[in-house]
């Protein structure tokens, strides 16, 4: 699941993950508030509470997009209670939030008129994170792909101050979108 996040980034040892947490979100818009609460609890336990505002805004947008665009509009929402998952992963120098949903369609940043009340979600994700992208969901080892497709994972990356190593310059293209 993490391989696309390594493209263009300094290598990391997969065993160096300092923390990982995930939750299943019900297919209801009220789940966005639950995702923010889960994010606050997780970041606080990782001593990253000071990053909550930016990360929660991005999590809210990613979860809202998954609920709005990825779940079939013609099916009852209750039937898709386990269709969206939020993952938070932390390393020494980065934090990744990722939302898995059942749609295989790529997320598209839209052009919203100034008077529109929606349509700026991916612009906000891009503005508040250090990079974002998406990739098709992998099939877990030993499983067969589900009939409706695998879905996708949309992720956002946040750089964290690295207190264990001297500051190193990051190449300008290190966080380019590799979707």
Image: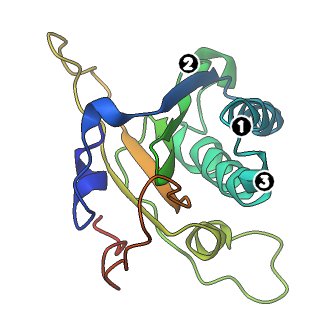
Image coords of residue 17 (percent x, y) = 40, 34
Quadrant for the N terminus in the image = top left
- Front disc: 2 or 3: 3
Q: Earlier in the sequence, mark 1 or mark 2?
A: 1
SS of the residue at dot 3? helix
Quadrant for the C terminus in the image = bottom left
Left/right of residue 125 with respect to residue 91 in the rendered view: right
Residue at the image point whose x is 73% and y is 35% from the top = 35
Q: Earlier in the sequence, mark 2 or mark 3?
A: 3
Circle 2 residue: 82
Q: Are marks 1 and 2 in contact (CB under 8 Å)?
A: no
| Whether residue 150 is visible | no
Residue at the image point whose x is 23% and y is 68% from the top = 8
Q: CA distance from mark 1 to mark 2?
A: 18 Å
Q: How many marks?
A: 3
Q: Earlier in the sequence, mark 1 or mark 3?
A: 1
Name above or below for residue 99 compared with residue 168.
Answer: above
Name above or below for residue 130 compared with residue 104.
Answer: below
- Front disc: 1 or 3: 3
Residue at the image point whose x is 60% and y is 84% from the top = 111
Circle 1 residue: 39
Image coords of residue 62 (percent x, y) = 60, 51
Image coords of residue 170 (percent x, y) = 36, 77
Name above or below for residue 163 compared with residue 87.
Answer: below
Q: Give the quadrant of residue 41.
A: top right
Q: CA distance from mark 1 to mark 3?
A: 12 Å
Left/right of residue 34 with respect to residue 18 in the rendered view: right
Residue at the image point whose x is 32% and y is 27% from the top = 148
| Whether residue 46 is visible | yes
Q: Give the quadrant of residue 133.
A: bottom left
Circle 3 residue: 50
Out of 170 and 179, give the one closest to the viewer: 170
């Amino acid at each position: 699941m993490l391989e696309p996040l390594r493209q263009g980034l300094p290598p990391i040892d997969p065993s160096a993950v300092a923390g990982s947490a995930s939750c299943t979100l019900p297919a209801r818009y009220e789940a966005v508030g639950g995702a923010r609460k889960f994010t606050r609890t997780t970041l606080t336990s990782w001593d990253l509470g000071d990053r909550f505002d930016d990360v929660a805004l991005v999590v809210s947008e990613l979860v809202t997009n998954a609920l709005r665009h990825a779940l079939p509009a013609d099916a009852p929402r209750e039937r898709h209670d386990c269709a969206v998952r939020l993952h938070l992963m932390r390393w020494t120098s980065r934090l990744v939030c990722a939302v898995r949903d059942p749609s295989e369609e790529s997320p598209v940043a839209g052009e919203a008129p100034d008077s529109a009340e929606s349509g700026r979600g991916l612009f906000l994700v891009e503005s508040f994170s250090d990079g974002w992208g998406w990739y098709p969901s992998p099939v877990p080892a030993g499983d067969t792909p589900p009939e409706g497709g695998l879905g996708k994972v949309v992720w956002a990356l946040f750089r964290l101050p690295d207190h264990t190593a001297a500051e190193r310059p990051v190449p300008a293209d290190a966080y380019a979108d590799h979707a």
